[in-house]
Image (tube, helix red, strand yellow):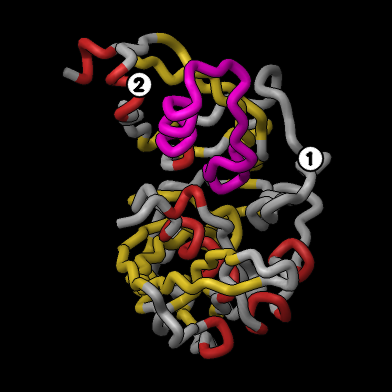
């Protein structure tokens, strides 16, 4: 698989551009109670979604992946507080979040009243790498859907009894400024916890020059636990810096929590340690 982390990431199409974010559709002013599926509680169901505007048939290359996330289906039938359970560790994770943002559900009910419940969602995805030439004649690569996703919804009971819905619902757009809601770790804001943290590879140039040392990368970890806006703040060597960025881009986290209830984006720094003897 090619290193998609270096490419401009976009899932284009009218379905995404016309679909308002969850934050626009439903806003929680306080803690929300999370029920469990049981005898008197019906489960939510996944409604059909027209993904055709987001699917491309002009593929230069196709990629397949399976991602499992947890989410809360709220009383409006929308996905909230999505977290990775089994990430792919590549851009399929970003596709999965965007697909789940498009999903709509019939909400769970208790005694005839719509309620919020925890669920897990397994997504089998096919993505399509396409190239487009912009007005300046520059070729840009984008990742789009290659086919209709296959999804499976199951109960998930590991959410606390009360949560606050994340207010920063969508991943940061490429080239955008970091949102004002980015927090600093400390006090009421816990640090994000890595789920997967792949080892950076040595570059050929770094191995040839026998380079050892630390490369420091700053990033925002968004409310889903995805790394955003990576930047090298302590350089080691250009090709080694690039390897560090590629590795950190594949990190996945349990996101930071404010007051143990609300997923929030935070800025952190990761040390990428290169030791040639370790790599052989």
Where does label 1 land, which residue?
181
Q: Secondary structure at mark 2?
A: helix
Q: Is residue 13 above or below residue 172?
A: below
Whichever of callouts 2 and 1 sits on the residue coming sooner in the sequence is 1
The reply to whether residue 115 is visible in this rendering is no
In front: 119, or 115?
119
Q: Is residue 166 above or below residue 256?
A: below
What is the quadrant of the N terminus in the image? bottom left
In front: 112, or 102?
102
Residue 43 at what x, y percent from top left?
44, 74
Residue 213 at what x, y percent from top left?
41, 9
> Which numbered tag is attached to residue 206?
2
Q: Secondary structure at mark 1?
A: loop
The span from disc 2 to disc 1 (Cα, nearest Å) is 38 Å
Q: Residue at x 49, y 64 (%)?
A: 95
Residue 232 at what x, y percent from top left?
59, 26
Q: Magenta span covers which residues?
A: 221-247
Relative to residue 193, is residue 217 drawn left or right? Answer: right
Question: Mark 2 or mark 1, which is nearer to you?
Answer: 2
Q: Residue at x 66, y 26 (%)?
A: 189
Residue 35 at what x, y percent from top left?
52, 59
């Amino acid at each position: 698989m090619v290193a998609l982390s270096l490419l401009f990431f976009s899932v284009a199409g009218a379905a995404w551009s016309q679909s308002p974010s969850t934050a626009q559709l439903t806003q929680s002013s306080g803690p929300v109670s999370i029920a469990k599926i049981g005898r008197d509680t019906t489960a939510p169901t996944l409604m059909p979604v027209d993904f055709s505007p987001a699917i491309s048939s002009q593929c230069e290359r196709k990629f397949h992946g399976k991602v499992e996330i947890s989410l809360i289906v709220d009383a409006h039938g929308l996905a909230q507080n999505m977290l990775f359970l089994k990430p792919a560790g590549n851009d399929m994770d970003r596709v999965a979040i965007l697909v789940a943002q498009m999903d709509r559900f019939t909400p769970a009910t208790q005694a005839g009243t719509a309620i919020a419940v925890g669920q897990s969602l397994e997504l089998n995805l096919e993505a399509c790498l396409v190239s487009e030439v912009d007005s300046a004649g520059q070729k840009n690569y984008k990742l789009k859907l290659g086919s209709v996703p296959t999804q499976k919804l199951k109960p998930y009971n590991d959410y606390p009894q009360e949560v606050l819905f994340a207010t920063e619902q969508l991943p940061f757009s490429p080239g955008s400024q970091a949102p004002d809601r980015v927090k600093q770790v400390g006090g009421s804001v816990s640090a994000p916890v890595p789920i997967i943290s792949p080892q950076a590879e040595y570059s050929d140039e770094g191995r040839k020059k026998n380079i050892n040392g630390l490369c420091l990368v700053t990033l925002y970890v968004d409310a889903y636990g995805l790394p955003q806006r990576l930047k090298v703040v302590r350089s080691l060597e250009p090709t080694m810096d690039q390897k560090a960025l590629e590795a950190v881009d594949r990190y996945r986290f349990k996101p930071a929590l404010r007051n143990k209830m609300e997923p929030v984006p935070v800025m952190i720094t990761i040390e990428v340690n290169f030791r040639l003897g370790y790599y052989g």
